[in-house]
Amino acid sequence: MPHTVKDKKKLLTRVRRIKGQAEALERALEQEVDCSAILQQIAAVRGAVNGLMMEVIEGHLREHLGPEAVDPAQRGKDLEQVTSVLRSYLK
């Protein structure tokens, strides 16, 4: 069973929190709130997204690259996938 299915409830909770933070950011912008508060909200959203990304990456690494990973060829493909995603994410 994929880790995103096993951890579905926890991941969805994180996504809903991010959604709430993004909506709060939108409201703050609409209400022309002070820019320092806007920056703080942006930092909170970014931190939440980074936390979600870390949670999913960690599960993926443990499942696909850990000691119980399938064959070495598949492990290599999975490693390339993760590397590609990380490069894209960190741009």
Image (tube, helix red, strand yellow):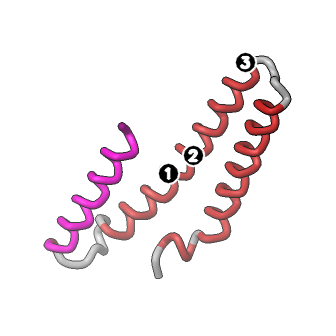
Quadrant in which the C terminus is drawn:
top left
The disc at residue 35 is 3
Which residue in the structure is indicated by mark 2? 49
Q: CA distance from mark 1 to mark 3?
A: 27 Å
What residue does disc 1 label?
Answer: 53
In contact (CB < 8 Å): disc 2 and disc 1: yes
Q: Nearer the viewer, residue 43 or 63?
A: 43
Q: Quadrant of residue 44?
A: top right
Percent of width and height locating residue 51? 56, 46
Q: Based on the displayed image, in which of its 4 quarters is residue 41 positioned?
A: top right
- For the magenta stretch, what is the residue range? 73-91
Task: Indicate yes or no whether the magenta region holds residue 87.
Answer: yes
Q: Residue at x 28, y 53 (%)?
A: 84
Residue 4 coordinates in the image, percent (x, y): 52, 70
Q: Which residue is found at the position 31% from the left and 65% from the top?
A: 66
Q: Is residue 42 above or below residue 36?
A: below
Is label 1 or label 3 in front? 3
The residue closer to the viewer here, 38 or 4, is 38
Of label 2 and label 3, which has the lower sequence position?
3
Q: Which secondary structure lies at badge 3? A: helix
Taking the spot 31% from the left edge, 57% from the top edge, the residue there is: 82
Q: What kind of residue is marked 2?
A: Val
Please name the predominant secondary structure of the magenta segment in the image: helix
Kind of residue at disc 3? Cys
Q: Position of residue 13 (x, y in %)?
A: 70, 60
Checking the image for residue 16, the label placed there is none
Instruction: Report the Cα–Cα distance between label 2 and label 1.
Output: 6 Å
Label 1: few (<14), some or many (≥20) within 10 Å? Answer: some
